[in-house]
C-alpha cells in the first residue's frame, strides 16, 4: 500500500527553503541586525534540510536523474557565468561544487550510503552513532574540505541517516510522537529558544564557518564547537517539527512539494543581479522590506506551475523519463 504524502514534511520543507532564500539575500541586502538573522538561519537550516532529505529517503532512487544531472548542468551554468564576470576566475570543474550546489553532491553520497546500510531498529541507531563520531572526527583531517563537499557531507550525514531511519522504521510513529501532549515537547522548544537567545547575545563572536562545517578544525573551530553546533541544529530541527502543523496548509504545503526549482534558480538569480553592477544596491527604501518582498517573489515565481513544469521536464529529464507520482 502506497504511503500517503506527509503534509508535515512539505510544511517544514517550505519553511527551510524560504530560509535558504532569505539567507542568500541577506548577503546582498544587509541591514542592522541582519548578521544575527543570518547566523540564526545558518545555525540549523542546512542540517535540518539534510534531516528532511532523510525523511524522504527511498531505496532505488534514481540519483543521476534527480540530483547529479541537475548538479552538472548548474555547475556548468555557474562556471559560464563566472567566466563572463570580470571579477571571477576559475576553470570549469566538477569536483569542487559551487557553494550553493554542495547539497546535491552530498545528497548523492547520502542516498547511496544509506542504501548500503541496514537501518532497521538498533542497526539504524548504531549507524547514526558511527556517522556522528565520523562527523566530529572529520575536523581533525585537513584534507576533508570543499573537495566533493566532503566536509559537509560527513558532518551532516548523521541528520540524513536519522531521517532515513525514521522513514524505514515508520514515519507514522514519528508523527504520532510529535503529536503527543507532554512536557518534553515544551522542554525541547524552550531549549531551542534559549539557544537562539544565547546566539543573539554572542553572535558577534561566532564565526559563520562554524555553521558551514566546510573545513577542518585547523581553519577555525574545535571538537567542542562542532559538537555544540550539531547539538544546536538537532534541537532546532526537532523544535521546528514539534511546532509545525501536521495538516495541509494552503500554499505552504504546495511550496514544500517543489523545493528544487527554488533551490537552484534563486541562487542563479542572486548571482546575475549581484554581478550585473549589483542591482540590489539600486533598490530604494529599507532593506528588510525588500528582503521580504524579494523572498516572497522568488519563492512564488519559482514554485509556480509553469516554472515547475519546465524545470521538471528539462532539468530533471522528465521529458525523456516520465516520473511516477511519489510521496514525500
Image (spheres, rainbow, N blue to C red):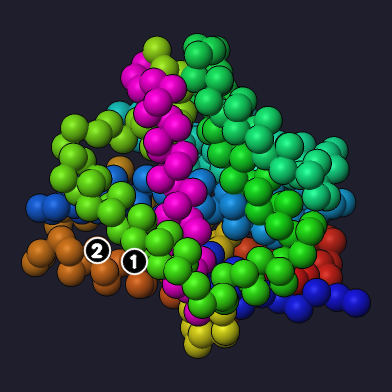
Q: Residue at x 62, y 69 (%)?
A: 177
Magenta segment range? 219-245
Residue 113, compared with residue 297, is above or below; it is above
Quarter placement of the C terminus: bottom right
Q: Does residue 74 appear to the left or right of 16 in the view shown?
A: right
Q: Does residue 204 appear to the left or right of 323 in the view shown?
A: left
Q: Which residue has dot 2 on it?
A: 291
Circle 2 SS class: helix
C-alpha span from label 1 to label 2: 6 Å
Q: Residue at x 68, y 30 (%)?
A: 130
Residue contact at pointers 1 and 2, CB within 8 angstroms: yes
Residue 234, disc: none
User: Main SS of the magenta segment?
Assistant: helix
303 or 133: nearer the viewer: 133
The image quadrant that residue 1 belongs to is: bottom right
Q: x, y (%) of residue 316? A: 71, 57
Q: Please count the marks in the image.
A: 2
Residue 295, disc: 1
Amino acid at each position: 500500500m502506497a504511503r500517503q504524502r506527509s503534509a508535515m514534511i512539505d510544511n517544514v520543507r517550505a519553511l527551510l527553503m524560504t530560509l535558504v532564500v532569505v539567507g542568500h539575500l541577506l548577503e546582498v541586502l544587509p541591514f542592522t541586525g541582519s548578521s544575527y538573522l543570518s547566523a540564526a538561519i545558518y545555525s540549523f537550516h542546512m542540517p535540518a534540510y539534510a534531516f528532511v532529505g532523510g525523511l524522504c529517503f527511498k531505496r532505488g532512487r534514481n540519483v543521476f536523474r534527480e540530483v547529479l544531472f541537475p548538479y552538472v548542468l548548474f555547475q556548468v551554468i555557474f562556471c559560464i557565468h563566472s567566466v563572463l564576470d570580470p571579477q571571477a576566475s576559475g576553470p570549469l570543474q566538477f569536483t569542487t561544487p559551487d557553494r550553493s550546489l554542495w547539497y546535491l553532491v552530498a545528497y548523492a553520497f547520502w542516498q547511496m550510503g544509506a542504501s548500503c546500510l541496514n537501518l532497521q531498529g538498533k542497526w539504524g541507531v548504531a549507524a547514526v552513532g558511527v556517522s556522528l563520531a565520523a562527523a566530529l572526527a572529520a575536523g581533525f583531517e585537513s584534507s576533508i574540505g570543499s573537495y566533493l563537499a566532503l566536509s559537509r557531507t560527513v558532518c551532516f550525514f548523521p541528520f540524513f541517516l536519522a531521517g532515513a531511519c525514521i522513514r524505514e522504521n515508520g514515519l507514522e510513529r514519528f508523527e504520532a510522537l510529535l503529536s503527543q501532549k507532554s512536557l518534553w515537547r515544551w522542554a525541547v522548544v524552550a531549549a531551542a529558544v534559549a539557544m537562539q537567545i544565547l546566539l543573539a547575545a554572542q553572535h558577534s563572536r561566532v564565526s559563520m564557518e562554524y555553521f558551514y562545517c566546510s573545513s577542518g578544525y585547523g581553519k577555525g573551530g574545535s571538537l567542542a564547537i562542532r559538537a555544540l553546533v550539531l547539538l544546536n541544529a538537532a534541537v532546532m530541527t526537532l523544535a521546528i517539527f514539534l511546532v509545525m502543523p501536521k495538516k495541509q496548509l494552503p500554499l505552504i504545503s504546495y511550496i514544500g512539494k517543489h523545493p528544487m526549482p527554488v533551490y537552484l534558480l534563486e541562487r542563479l538569480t542572486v548571482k546575475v543581479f549581484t554581478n550585473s553592477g549589483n542591482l540590489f544596491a539600486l533598490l530604494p527604501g529599507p532593506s528588510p522590506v525588500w528582503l521580504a518582498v524579494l523572498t516572497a517573489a522568488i519563492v512564488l515565481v519559482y514554485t509556480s506551475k509553469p516554472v515547475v513544469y519546465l524545470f521538471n521536464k528539462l532539468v530533471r529529464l522528465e521529458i525523456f523519463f516520465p516520473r511516477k507520482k511519489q510521496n514525500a
